[in-house]
Image (cartoon, coloured by chain):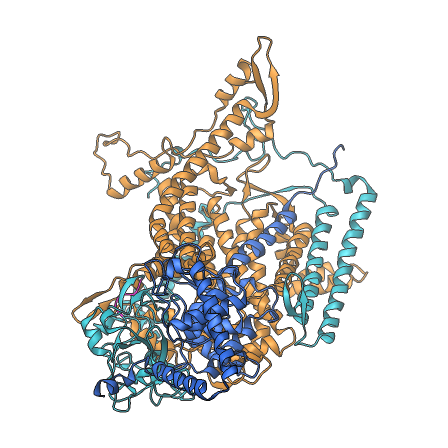
Amino acid sequence: MKKLSARRRHPLAAVVVLLFALAATGGLYAAFAPAGKAQADETAQSLAIEEGKKLYAVGCASCHGTGGQGTTDGPSLVGVGSAAVDFQVGTGRMPAQQPGAQVPKKKVIYTQAQIDQLAAYVASLGAGPITPTESQTDPSNADVGKGGELFRTNCAQCHNFTGEGGALTHGKFAPSLEGVSPKHIYEAMQTGPQNMPSFPDSTMPEKEKKDIIAYVKAVNGEETPSPGGFGLGGLGPVSEGLFAWIFGLGALIAVAVWVAAHTAKAKKS
Amino acid sequence: MSSQENPEEALPAEQGNAHGEVAPKDDPFADPGLPPHKPRIQDLDERAAKRSERVVAFLFTLSMIATIGFIASFVAFPIDKIVYVWPLGHVSALNLSLGLTLGIALFCIGAGAVHWARTLMSDVEVADERHAIQASPEVKAKVMADFKAGAEESVIGRRKLIRTTMFGALALVPLSGVVLLRDLGPLPEKKLRETSWDKGKRLINQNTMEPLRAEDVVVGSLTFAVPEGLKEDDHEFNQKIAKDALMIVRIQPDEIKNKQQREWAAEGIVAYSKICTHVGCPISLYEQQTHHVLCPCHQSTFDLSDGARVIFGPAGHPLPQLRIKVNDQGYLEAMGDFAEPVGPAFWERG
Amino acid sequence: MSTATTTESKPQQKAPAGERVADWADGRLGIYSLAKANMRKIFPDHWSFMLGEICMYSFIIIILTGVYLTLFFHPSMNEVVYHGSYAPMHGIRMTEAYASTLDISFDVRGGLLIRQIHHWGALIFLAAMFVHMMRVFFTGAFRKPREVNWLFGFLLFVLGMFTGFTGYSLPDDLLSGTGVRFTQGAILSVPVVGTYISMFLFGGEFPGHDMVARFYSIHILLLPGIMLGLMVAHLILVFYHKHTQFAGPGRTNNNVVGMPLLPVYMAKAGGFFFLVFGIIAIIAAAFTINPVWALGPYRPDQVSTGAQPDWYMGFAEGLIRVMPGWEINLWGHTLVLGVFIPLTLFGVILAVIAVWPFLESWVTGDKREHHIAQRPRNNPTRTAFGVAWITVYFIGLVGGGNDLWATHFHLSLNAISWFVRIGFFAGPVLAFIITKRICLGLQRRDAEKVLHGRESGIIKRLPHGEFIEVHEPLDANKLHTLTAHEQYAPAEIGPAEDENGVTRKVGPAEKLRVKLSKGMYGEGNQIAKPTAEEYKEITSGHGHH
């Protein structure tokens, strides 16, 4: 018992308790619920896991191992949770094409249904962050101003003021957040994909995550106004300086050439 | 260099020194003189000249129309109206219309004037003589004599006491100005060595402004913390957070390579200053797999699993670590101030 | 009424109104004498002679728009909670400086446009000064009597950098605040007095409550005031010296050939002001610059990636980014070489180009006036040196943006830093060698053209079957233009004894001078231009090839 109490502050303690609770509710439910429906749900769930396992064996097992235990080519997936799968596969990062400093975003090759099946399978290997529901990631009622402040404290150092992305060490980079869905932003904060640190609910609660998503959508959405004109990539002084040199000074020199050039002479006088 | 060493004869013949005179016949490279003026079409053909006149007048008229357009846009477009203009994007209608009309109004005046000058004003090239900048020996002699006379009349050469005291007075008087600058700011004293961290101060999560519990901080996560009691509306908030800002990560204790770091951590939770030791940018580009943290300003890279040692870039020393512990209620708290000054190095840092 | 006016106004008929006004002014200001010397002043036509005008006009545009901005900007660091028109900043604490910049952008009609003209104008002003300075350098237009004006111009460039920097810092946004933080860190690195300067500049600990107000008076009064004075002096000297011109038929060292100020240059230069203003206004209409609303207010614990200064400070930024982190701790003191060396280098590298004219005139020992602008190829060593200097400058700029090059070209940040570190030393050497070879090649081609004529592209078959390309001989104008440049002979140490048999002392400075002179004008460092004899021999001898 002493051993157990020492472990109650372990970071995974909450997860373990949650799992027990889930298992208990599940068990109770199974025991008391009308047999037919439970059967159906369970079948649907196990069917999804079964389908996910097949997809996994074809697309993932070569790097992550047949049971998700990981190999030299890919990390263990035990305990990464469905949110991680939904993010990695849903943004096309997984399956990875080739080893490199960082696995980039690509065309998504699975349907959302397949991704859910894969996620269900991986979640069955060990508990981890769960794919958020739509209401969890909906930024419509969030505080954009607060989100901006949180974004500048926690995110802008890698992703830039408005989420245009930036460089990390040795060829790694923080990707642009343009066009990334609220769900994927939420999942990235939850799970900390690749070298990104995670911002779990314990330090960054759901409400704050929503504020951040709302800010990203406000400053880097499809309809985000750029009142001053074309934004030059939102990259700041480097692109502005290049523009001033090439187009600004370039145009002025072209005009200077015209001003100073001798007017065409009549061919024969 | 004195001129004896470089006699003028050693220098090459002066460039184009022919004064426009007819050069000796046997020099094939001699200056043939200004070529004769060739007329433009406008000089010969009145119709062409008329065309030019119309172009200039058109440009000036266009400018007038553009100015009217500027005023109309100013009145017509509300300041917050956003329109989509390909390829610029969703831009302010007012900014775009004001800028374009102003630009056109100005550009057309310039273009009209230049076109006028180029096509209708005389384009005969004229030569203007240059005159030596240097004065003639006579002028110089006159100036020197005047100066000598003036200096003598002032008796400054003879009355040494006047001269010495005057220079003394002139040299001292600017000191008043220097002294007046004293109150620009306080003396440094120990200000750069102290932060608000102190024994028993809890770490406050900047996202929620709640005290951080050890179990909140999981491996791979990144959290920023401020000392208990620091409020955003505090008058000195910016000065304080410029030194207090803290970066919290959790590393598996067996991955921590530095012994002191392990001791100063609490259950693998390490607290490092967020202020770069190079020139003070908030450094926080944490790569959770490598435990490297990169500064976005000058790319100094620190290894958080090895005492925040500098592994790349221009920073000169590791990030200071704050010694923390988990208190009885499970909260993270500081065990004192930083052991060394945070932020950029300075002369008195030692 | 002065006597001159009374005598002139004797005729019975009343002079036209304009003339009477001019008479009035002349009686008090002496404008007729001024106009006599300057109204028909001749300016040579060349596009590169207009670069300085771009600088002057953009400076005027910046002053005009800057005055407008001061009407709305609050140079205060008092904190307010924002509730203005820009929704994503609602409820955020910020300084009045930042809030008023948001107001200029979102609540003052045309405010955003003027802000953008001001900022684009500043970037173009600095770029134009850089290019103008290089034009003067590469054509040797800094030579006597223009050395002082070269220094005025150089000072304008340096002051322009600092005026730009202080202005960029005024909105107190997160990007510029990070730049100020960097400046403060750099000041701290100064041995002995660093901490004191920092405390005095910021009125205490960084960032303090005084920075914006102090930078404001520096930005709008102190520096532009000095610059305006320097610019006027610069212009007066341009008028006084009369403009340089390129060699050509009828263009000598003793005249200046071109068009008169009235009317041609009045229209061309006056019109050019409107053209410059118009183009900058159009750029400001269509392209965002420094969208401060997206950056957020400055807080010393926040930052964004891609934190760069405006381009003219990018070179200093690059130096500081690629410097290794050297730090020496001795006797309780810290020497922050990792920051202090780049800080010093920044000044030294700029100073090197500023002192070149004096070095060059010392080496050549030439004390005559020069009014003919040289073609860069005809002074290969100077040109190569200038290109090497530009190479250092631009390698620094690349270093200043290393993170953006990394993301945009999919390279490693660390690899770029190493490239810049090596390039900083190897780049200028390579650039020097390559440029010199190109210059010498061009000189050879010129000599070839003079002696053998222009390649006409027409292939002719000779009676005995050989094919040759017909070379057209150059006309007298071109012959003159291509041979008008002067060539220095390298200096010699001279005989150890003079004609009287007394041993001459040759100091180390003189030895160095001779060495440098050989390096600049000795064999292999310039191609002797064709002589009249060579030309005659070839042309009189055997036809055309």
Chain B's colour is cyan
Q: Residue at x 76, y 33 (%)?
A: A269
In the image: residue B283, left or right of residue C60: left
In the rendered structure, does residue C503 fall within the stretch colored magenta? no
Please determine whether, in this image, residue C383 is positioned above or below residue A106. Answer: above
- Up-down: is C351 above or below C201? above
The blue one among the chains is A
Q: Is residue A160 visible?
A: no
Q: Which of these two is toward me, A205 or C311? A: A205
Q: From the top left corner, tell me how far across and down residue B278 is, in percent.
A: 31, 68
Residue B61: where, in percent of width, then height? 78, 60
Q: Residue at (59%, 66%) from the top-left corner? A: C117
**Quarter of the figure that contains the C terminus of chain C:** top right
Quick one: which residue is furthest to the right in this view?
B47
The chain letter of the orange chain reads: C
In this rendering, would C326 be left or right of A69? left
- Nearer to us in this view, A129 or B212: A129
Which residue ends up furthest to the top in the rendered image? C464
Q: In which quarter of the view is residue C26 placed?
A: bottom right
State whether residue C246 appears in this view. Answer: yes
User: Furthest-left residue in view?
Assistant: C331
Q: Which range of residues does the magenta coloring cover?
A: B314-318
- Residue at 28%, 76% in the rendered image: B270
Q: Which residue is at a point 27% across and 44% down the rendered structure image?
A: C509
Q: Main secondary structure of the magenta part?
A: loop
Residue C434 position in % (x across, y down): 41, 39
Q: Nearer the viewer, residue C360 or B261?
A: B261
At which x and y percent is residue B34? Answer: 63, 35
- Between B308 and A46, the residue placed more toward the observer is A46
